Amino acid sequence: MTEETTGKSRRAFLKGAALTGVGLAAGKAGAATPDPLITEVQPWASGLGDGVDETPYGLPIEFEDDVIRRNVEWLTADTISSINFTPIHALDGTITPQGCAFERHHSGAIELKKEDYRLMINGMVDRPLVFTYADLERFPRENHVYFCECAANTGMEWAGAQLNGAQFTHGMIHNMEYTGVPLRTLLEEAGYDTAGKWVFVEGADASSNGRSIPMEKALDDVLVAFKANGEALRKEHGYPVRLVVPGWEGNMWIKWIRRIEVMDGPVESREETSKYTDTLADGISRKWTWEMDAKSVVTSPSPQSPITHGNGPLVISGLAWSGRGAITRVDVSKDGGKTWETARLAKPGEKMALTRFYLDTEWNGEEMMLQSRAMDDTGYVQPTKAQLREVRGLNSIYHNNCIQTWLVRANGEAENVEVS
């Protein structure tokens, strides 16, 4: 269906709806029963609403109380070292509200006051330094929008369709505007040794989660952040200070960051050897697989966001992202990858940030096998699961960026399926 045809069809639908509305409101002969939501004064228009201080910190209205993070109980033994998922099926645009942004903890979210916060830079530096929170606020700061994706996002889907909902298959991701100081600035303040090729960053929580980062990346775009979406970080996101490592797996975005050591080699910590490496079919594991490759998913329609309005105009919506650059194009298939249509990007893709895409189409109750396929400015094209398996086998957990399929049935409901 061409854009022109879709546009005409949508205009015809809207015109018909408008005419129907006039008939209902006026109660004309032959029209349906007048709609009391239009013809009668409703309770919300009959009295006064809440005052300005009813909720000093604004909260979503009760009618949106289903838009929440959720975990999957059987994934981990305890919620202290676990993960929950962003309700991406219920959001639009690209910015994730902090209250909806997924959590991943290795020993629980800690409470650390600004006044008690310290950040040490040591190792191969001229001047080992310790910064307070107030010290960090005095450095020139920057604002950047980046996505943070857990390397295990979609990991349960390697062996087949497992979890029935975009929130659970792809919800280990958020996209926020971070405010902070470039790590490069702090390293220069300490006088880092140019012979140091790595930094080791460590968190203040009981797990002492730590990762090695190549100096080239540390000096490029890594941010020591203390705000997200204009406000203080949430406790679960590393308050008061966290690391932001654009485009790279979320485990490297150390929360409650307390120490940065300049070194001549990587530490080879638990989180970069036995964990967060990719085991191939022959049992050998790839390591240093930091970047999150181009990926996308249709968020609506999807299992948690079925079609409820019946036949006619339909907006297919979703998200795309790439840790190697900016999204340049997203294609959508309604027949399981046999044919593709180019979706409309809500705005030009930004480096290491989520991109919203839409396909304005027509649905007449036929079954659909919905897929999306992202491309970034490096020329990378999102692969099918079969293509990934051909390279990595079935032993992997991390970095599953395959094309996702939703089967949309004639009643508008959808489920997670796999196309072989």
Image (cartoon, rainbow, N blue to C red):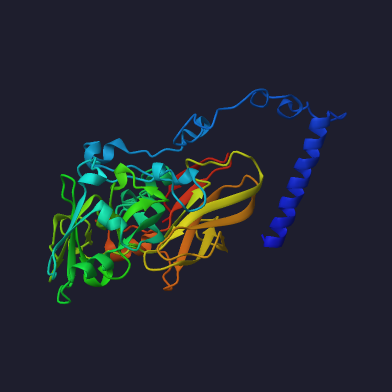
- At 66% across and 59% down in the image, what residue appears? 1
Q: Quadrant of residue 197?
A: bottom left
The image position of residue 206, as x and y in percent, is 15, 44
- At 25% across and 58% down in the image, what residue appears? 252
Image quadrant holding the C terminus, namely bottom left
Q: Is there any visible trace of residue 171 in the rendered image?
A: no
- At 36% across and 51% down in the image, what residue appears? 227
Which of 172/117 is in front? 117
Which of 390/383 is in front? 383
Q: Is there any visible trace of residue 10 in the rendered image?
A: yes
Compared to residue 400, the image places residue 195 above or below, namely: below
The image position of residue 83, as x and y in percent, is 29, 43
Compared to residue 352, the image places residue 165 above or below, namely: above
Compared to residue 145, the image places residue 198 above or below, namely: below
Q: Quadrant of residue 260?
A: bottom left
Looking at the image, the residue that sits furthest to the bottom is: 195
Q: Quadrant of residue 147?
A: bottom left
The image position of residue 329, as x and y in percent, is 51, 66
The image position of residue 217, as x and y in percent, is 27, 69
Relative horizontal placement of residue 210, taking residue 368 as reference (left or right):
left
In this figure, what is the number of numbered marks?
0
Relative horizontal placement of residue 375, taking residue 387 as reference (left or right):
right
Compared to residue 100, the image places residue 373 above or below, namely: below
Which of 369/211 is in front? 211
